[in-house]
Structure formats: C-alpha cells, structure tokens
Image: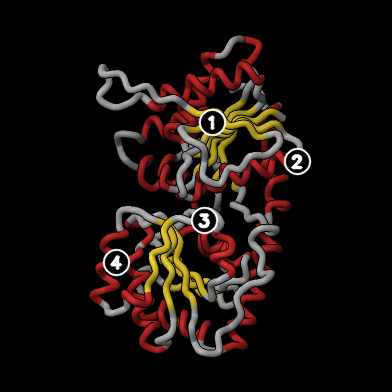
Amino acid sequence: MKIGISCHPTHGGSGVVATELAMALAKRGHEIHVVSEKRPFRLVEMHNVHFHQVNVTDYPLFKQPPSGLCLANELAEVADEHKLDIIHAHYAIPHAISAMLARDMLCECSSHVRIVTTLHGTDITLVGSDRNFYRICRYAMQKCHGLTTVSKWLAQQTMDTFKLDKTPHVIPNFVDCDRFTPKQRIAYPEDGAFRILHASNFRAVKRVFDVVRVFAEVHKQLPNAKLIMVGDGPDHGRARELAAELGVCDSVEFAGPQLNIEQTYRDSHLCLLLSDYESFGLAALEAMASGTPVVVSKAGGLVEVVDEGQSGFLRPVGDIAAMAEAAVSVLDDRATWQHMSQAAARHAREQFCKDKIIPLYEQFYERVAFKPEQ
C-alpha cells in the first residue's frame, strides 16, 4: 500500500511511534511518505520511506503561522502526486483535521484515499477536553474512516469524554526487539553503583520532581546509585534545583535527549516512569525490552504494559515512599534483579514486539480501505 504518515517530529511518544511504524511498514514492502514540519528525530534514511517537509508560511497578515493549513496543503500534494491509499494521522488536532481537508481538496482520481487517526493521549485528556477544541476533536474522530487508540484505557477515556458512535479500535504501541534487546546489557554492580533511568519530555504530567524525590529516598539506602535523566522540557530547571535542595545533585546526571537511547536502557538497572498517567508508556516498554525492570505509576495504560511483580512494580501516583521501597526491593537483591530483568525482556518480546503489532495495522488499513463511505 501507499501510506502517508503525519505526525509531530518531537521526542514525544506519538512521534516515536509514528516514525517507528513508518520504518517498519517500509521494511514490509509498503511505500511510506512521512509529512511533518521537520524530519522526525528517529527517522533514518531507508528504502521506501520518503520525507516531505511542511513549509509553514509566516505572512504578516497572520498573528500565528497557519501550520494546520500548510500541513493540509502538503498532504494534498503528496496524496495526489503519489496516489496514496491511506493518510495515517497521529493526533486528532491538527493532523486528522488537516488530513480531512487535504482529502477534500483532491481531484476525483485521488479521492479514494482514506483517513486513519491514532489517538495517543493528550489529544484526548488535554486538548480534546478543552471546550475550545472539543467539537473539532469530536468531528475529527467521528468523520475519519478509521480510529485507533494505543490502549484500552485510552479507548475508554475517549468514549467517556466524547460519547462517540463507535469505540475506537485498540492497537497497542510496540517495540523493535532487534534494537531494544537485553544482549550486552550492564551487569549487576557488586559495589552498589546502580544506574537508575528516567526518560521523558519533562512536562508536568511526567512528574519529574517525583522522580528526583524517589531517587533521593533510594540514595539514602543505596548511596552509590546514580540517576540519569534523559530528555528535556519545561521542568528541567526546577528538577536540577530540587536535586540540589535534596543533596543529591552530584549523583544526578541530566543527559539531555538521546537518539540511540537503546544503549542507555541497557546501561541502566532500573527505569522510573512516575507520571500522573500514561496513555500507554512507551518508555517503560522500551526499558523492559532492554532487560531493565521498571517502577511506574499505577495509572492509565501503564497497567496494560507492566506485569506487576514480574517485569516491574506499579505504585499509586505520588506515593514517594512506596515507589522508593519498590525501587530498593528490585535493586538490593541480585537474584530479584536478575529475575525481573529476564521477565521484563520476555514480557515485552512476547506481547509487544513490532512483528506482532505491525500486522494489526496492516489488517486495519485493509479493512478501512474497503470500508464504504459514510
């Protein structure tokens, strides 16, 4: 099939999933056209993947650049020139709305293109629930030819918020088990020099301050432990200040965004993801696939990803003491850590490897392609 993929190019989970999906589909013989304002950070040069940059025009007439309209125009040109079968929009706004507008602009010879929208979380919990965007979000979800979410939890949230005519189809996120693998991972440290990882975009929902507080509690019992904070975002500065206030700044490394994060996962003994909620929790999955146990919030789609007591621990949001206790229980016993490391990699491989999930998207595309118009 000829598939267009529209997504954010940033380090967030939706952009990562869209990019990994594009490359996986290309390897399976599909012709893929990625359309975004800049090249997604994980998108590499490969056969069958074509990148189309959206040129956002900044006319003095507009107070804000009309990025959604520019995206629609580029999608229409790509769909018309390359005769796309599917435009897969990752996020309702602006991507699904722009895709629908693009389709309406196409000539009759290209009007067969179908719109698939994948919801990733904040387009429902933040943007879509805002009254200024509610109607247009609901319109995008109702009118696209196929709607998916990345977890059962997000599907239910979508129905609760928007009262759609039909429940979205659930296709979970996936991991490349050839890249995210426990092979050559770091050994258990006899000197207690544990490496604890957190990776996110440092937004408020990620609760990076809780990560620092949990580490400070762990550090009291495991004084040789280190915390590696991967990523960047609005709470970066305050997280640094908090580490200093709690007396652990010398044991906390702010490593910034990392392209080849799979090695970082393998070089870590534990991953913390303590968010208010996650629609899925891709960082936790990538850590598990790399043989790194996790301690995560018992919230959102994370309960569908983590096998409690085997691949990691789920603890109530904001419960610093419980999370720190869980982290120490994983790290402080070699046998426990080795068992959970092996169980984490096995669970990720058995449930979420791309070879299991990508065919689900292919089947969905086929179903949508032959679905009668509404």
Residue bearing the label numbered 1: 35
Labels 4 and 1: the sequence-earlier one:
1
Labels 1 and 2: the sequence-earlier one:
2
Q: Is residue 274 left or right of residue 2?
A: left
Determine whether 276 is above or below 41 in the image. below
Residue bearing the label numbered 2: 28
Asked if the residues shown at circle 2 and circle 3 are in contact, with their CB atoms under 8 angstroms apart, the answer is no
Q: Residues within 10 Å of mark 4 (few under 14, many from 20)?
A: some
Residue bearing the label numbered 3: 280
Residue bearing the label numbered 4: 240
Q: Where is residue 232 in the image (x, y as percent from the top left)?
A: 38, 55
The residue drawn where x is 43% and y is 69% is 228
Q: Position of residue 7 (x, y in %)?
A: 50, 37
Q: Is residue 64 visible?
A: yes
Q: How far apart are marks 2 and 3 (CA)?
A: 25 Å
Q: Which mark is residue 237?
A: none
